[in-house]
Image (cartoon, rainbow, N blue to C red):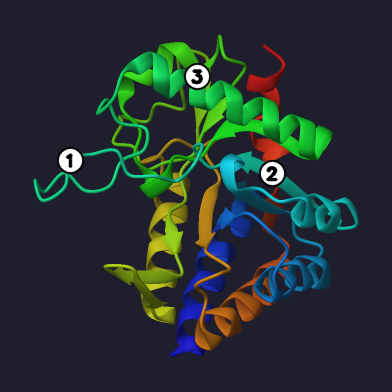
Amino acid sequence: MIEKALADIRRELDAWGETGRTAFLWWRDDDAARATPELETLLALSARYSIPCNLAVIPARAEGSLQERLAAAGQVWVLQHGYAHVNHAPRNQGLGAWELGLHRPLEQILLDLKRGREELEALFGGRFVPAVVPPWNRIDPALFPHLRPLGFCGVSAEWNRDQTFEIDGVRIVSAHADLLRWKGKQAAFAGAGRVAQSLVEHLRAKRLGRAEPREPSGVLTHHLEMDGPAWEFMDVLLRATTTHGACRWLAAEDIFAQGRDK
């Protein structure tokens, strides 16, 4: 199954190469807070293939051990994973989990985001790219007009839009292929076929003009939840894509650079 999945990805990248174009990808990993053995596995993969990894760090949980470990790591960027990764939506109403929904005063949400940005800037300096990764991939659209004034240049979340790359000066970049499937709080590898299909679908849509061409195709991991098959697939995916001439992996600094300069 892995070989077929990789063949599908290579075939799509070949199609990009035949037209002289480069397919841009990016790697986002969520829920970072401290140095762990799982984080070491992730950093080793990033180093092995010289691929930038973009860590969504939870400000309220970030520990000094993470600061120290990332200071010695190459090609790792920090994004802001909400503030405390706490669900504020009412329970048992079918609303799902939200930290950045309007289930509490807007002023409190914005204060948390501002506090989180300041904390991550203090911890990680130039490695921090001020882009918000909402916990559970959900953010209320009402927050967008306030993000730029707070110093944020980007958002990475699930977002239904008609090829909109930027809202209120904030660049929006999704993660399209999640290596895990979730049942409640339990996670397991989604399967090579499913991950490859999600990635290829977005790449093909961009190539054919059906999706925003400037948005890189995102691969999403959660290092604390990854099982053996998930790590194995990520390894072979990085190996296959880094050896293909029509593919390039981007760092958050590259993705959000233009928005950051505004």
Disc 1 to disc 3, C-alpha distance: 21 Å
Which of the two labelled residues, at mark 1 and mark 3, occupies the earlier sequence position?
1
Q: Which residue is mark 2?
A: 78
Does 122 appear above or below 64?
above
Does 97 appear above or below 214?
below
Mark 1, secondary structure of its residue: loop
Residue lying furthest left in this view? 93
Does 252 appear above or below 153?
below
Residue occupying image coordinates x 68% and y 21%: 260
Question: In the depicted view, which residue is nearer to us: 67 or 191?
Answer: 67
Q: Residues within 10 Å of mark 3 (few under 14, many from 20)?
A: few
Q: Which residue is mark 3?
A: 111
Mark 2, secondary structure of its residue: strand
Q: Where is residue 16 shown, x and y percent of the image?
A: 57, 56
Mark identifier at residue 90? 1
Residue 72 falls in image quadrant? bottom right
Inspect the image, locate mark 3, and give the three-letter code of the amino acid beneath it. Answer: Leu
Residue occupying image coordinates x 46% and y 12%: 146
